[in-house]
Amino acid sequence: MEEDGVGKEVITQLTTSMLTNKEFYTDSNGRDFLKRVRDYREDWSLQVNEPVAGNYYPLNLGIYIKDNKSELSILVDRATGGGSIKDGQVELMLHRRLLSDDGKGVAEALDEQVCQNNNCQGLTVRGNYHVAIHNLRSGSQWRRTTGQEIYSPLLLAFSHENMGNWKAFHETKGTLIDPNYSLPPNVALITLEELDDGMVLLRLAHLYESLVKTPSFQL
């Protein structure tokens, strides 16, 4: 953001005609999606003093809204904040640059800058949103599968090494798995590591939400 003496909060807002009854869903550390209700807390009686900030939640994977017919899902490629301030609407924080302290305890303004050769400017923020509309109860698999692709994209790797030499030093001595076998789309490989005592540590994760699809795979 440019320096013009005015604090700014830049948001992305998607508006639909969906009847969402104050409800929306945000991810919990990139895993399960939790139901949120605007101006409400399940654990205590909420006094609404901040109708916008009080309905923002941290997003690591995404946010979605739904009604009795359809779902609107938005996935992010980096941590941000989001909420549903009005029914049928999703709001995502793109960037903030505030020049005055908001009195919330930090005792300084949210004015991050990048400096080079004593020349300081406001940060430039970039990000990608992945947006999809599905029929009701059809968006869960897309959110999990696409979210995994965003979190762990395929990487191209190249080598100048002779393929014959490489195979000679990386020959597989034995395997119990069919070389053509691959894990189902709802199962992710987290860790495959040989330990010092010769044992192998294998950690797998169920990507889909509960009750969507029971994981099944070969070992």
Image (spheres, rainbow, N blue to C red):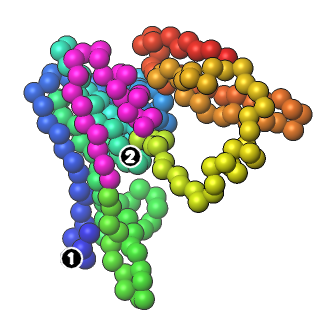
Task: Give, as a single range, the part of the protein colored magenta.
Answer: 127-149
Near-viewer residue (132 or 154)? 154
Residue at 56% in and 12% down:
216
Residue 219 in magenta stretch: no
- Expressed as whole percent of the image width and height from the top left, the position of residue 103 reads 38, 60
Up-down relation of residue 166 to residue 27 (above or below): below
* Front of the two marks 2 and 1: 2
Near-viewer residue (19 or 216)? 216
Task: Find numbered disc 2 in the image and state the secondary structure of the residue it sits on.
Answer: loop
Res. 106 visible in picture: yes
Amino acid beneath label 2: Asp
- Expressed as whole percent of the image width and height from the top left, the position of residue 20 reads 20, 23
When asked about the image quadrant of residue 83, the answer is top left
Return the residue at label 2: 77
Near-viewer residue (132 or 46)? 132
- Expressed as whole percent of the image width and height from the top left, the position of residue 164 reads 67, 48
Q: Residue placed farthest to the left in the image?
A: 17
Q: Residue placed farthest to the front in the image?
A: 164
Residue at 24% in and 15% down:
136
Up-down relation of residue 171 to residue 164 (above or below): above
- Expressed as whole percent of the image width and height from the top left, the position of residue 102 reads 35, 60
Drawn side of residue 141 relative to residue 134, left or right? right
Question: How busy is the neighbourhood of tag 2: few (under 14 within 10 Å), some, or many (20 plus)?
Answer: some
Image quarter of the C terminus: top right
Point out which mark residue 87 bears. none
Point out which mark residue 4 bears. 1
Residue at 17% in and 29% down:
87
Amino acid beneath label 1: Asp
